[in-house]
Amino acid sequence: MTHDAIILGAGAAGLMCAATTGQRGRRVLLVDHAPEVGRKIVISGGGRCNFTNVDAAPDRYISANPHFAKSALGRYTAADFIALVDAHGIAWHEKTLGQLFCDGSARQIVAMLLDECAKGQVDLALGHAAEVEHDGIGFRVTIGERIATAPKLVIATGGPSIPKLGATDFAYRLARRFGLKLVEPRPALVPLTLGPDEALFRELSGVATEVVATAAGPGFREAALFTHRGLSGPAILQASSYWRHGEAVAIDFAPGRSPDWLVEAKRSNPRAGIRRMLDLPDRLSEALAAKLGIAAELGNVPDRTLRDAAARLKAWPFRPNGTEGYAKAEVTVGGISTAELSSRTMEVKKMPGLHAIGEAVDVTGWLGGYNFQWAWASGWATGQAI
């Protein structure tokens, strides 16, 4: 059967691209090896789908080319997707930091996208792996016993994060076959693991507190959670996208405090111990005080020692020995190099007719709806170009 476009991957980007393309009068085939569409959408946001962020802007994305995302994000904004959600009567609310969630279920977003695909008379082929061939003119895709051809092919199969939902590295394998460069993929928005030398902190499993976490990028002020394997929580997940093996993660356990705050505390409350002044969960305060080696009342501690302690608390270095990998990663950093693509159409420069969108591409957003907004924007941009 002949189509105008075949889209591989029925996740957020693929569904958006299919709906946009189909509603422009193109004959679209949307293919996925999973038996149902939008699996990551369904589990996202605790089942309520953090579907966008009102603060979505290019500086909230990681890419070898930080300018690449500007075109798509500027032409299809969070407000555009919100308008679509509103048009379908889906109730939503804003949590912290610009994050928007469904009041009800993430399945409402999937149903909305399927409805939009139906308006574009999109043909679905689910539950079978796809085999792709390119004859120099168009693309031939075998899905089970079915064969489809099209002059346009869109890679929207995402990255390998959350393999239990069927995620694979198919996009990268296909890209290599077509001679496309990749930026080395790695797990992102993922918990970090600590080695035996950090056993004291691993024993704090279950303790959470607000910190600023920094790893070779911006600092993120949110909650950090100690686990039996290391560090997690929103602040850590954010920092993990910037972290590289061998590097340290700096944790500010006293966000907003001045460099002299312990000296000032000594003046106002000389009989207090440092554990009391830390204003952190008891077990964490005890662990930090033990590491600092300050057991005396503040009045008996030299100012210089207190300033050194305050400086350490502002940038406490942890050296993770790894991450919890793709199994626990929400997304993937890296992927198909943006140098291969048009930023306006997502089309491969050296192979007209081939496009790549969403998580398959080297554009990765912060935690909090940014990656969905990239999926919507890149899918829409390609849909407008086909």
Image (tube, rainbow, N blue to C red):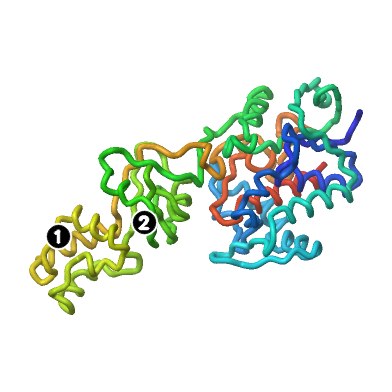
The amino acid beneath tag 1 is Ile
Query: SS at mark 1?
Result: loop
Q: Is residue 227 above or below residue 350?
A: below
Q: Which percent across, then down, holds residue 17? A: 77, 45
Residue under the image location 44 percent in, 55 percent down: 235
Location of residue 184 with respect to 311 vertically, above or below: above
202 vs 290, left or right, is right
Q: Residues within 10 Å of mark 1 (few under 14, many from 20)?
A: some
The residue singled out by tag 2 in the image is 207
* Residue drawn at (17%, 72%) of the image: 272
Determine the image quadrant of residue 348.
Answer: top right
Foreground disc of the pair 2, 1 = 2
Q: Residue furthest bottom?
A: 268
Q: Position of residue 320 (x, y in %)?
A: 35, 41
- Give the percent coordinates (x, y) of residue 131: 75, 23
Q: Which badge, 2 or 1, is on the more N-terminal residue?
A: 2
What residue is pinned by disc 1? 294
Instruction: Pinpoint residue 200: horizontal percent, then vertical percent.
Output: 26, 47
The answer to the question of whether label 2 and label 1 lie on touching residues, with beta carbons closer than 8 A, is no
Name the residue rendered at 23%, 62% in the picture.
310
Side of 304 where 54 appears, left or right: right
- Does residue 75 appear to the left or right of 237 in the view shown? right
**Location of residue 269 with respect to 356 vertically, above or below:** below
Numbered disc 2: secondary structure: loop
| Placement of the C terminus among the 4 image quadrants | top right
- Disc 2 marks a residue whose amino acid type is Val
Q: Which residue is rendered at x = 81% and y = 20% of the image?
A: 135
Q: Nearer the viewer, residue 69 or 132?
A: 132
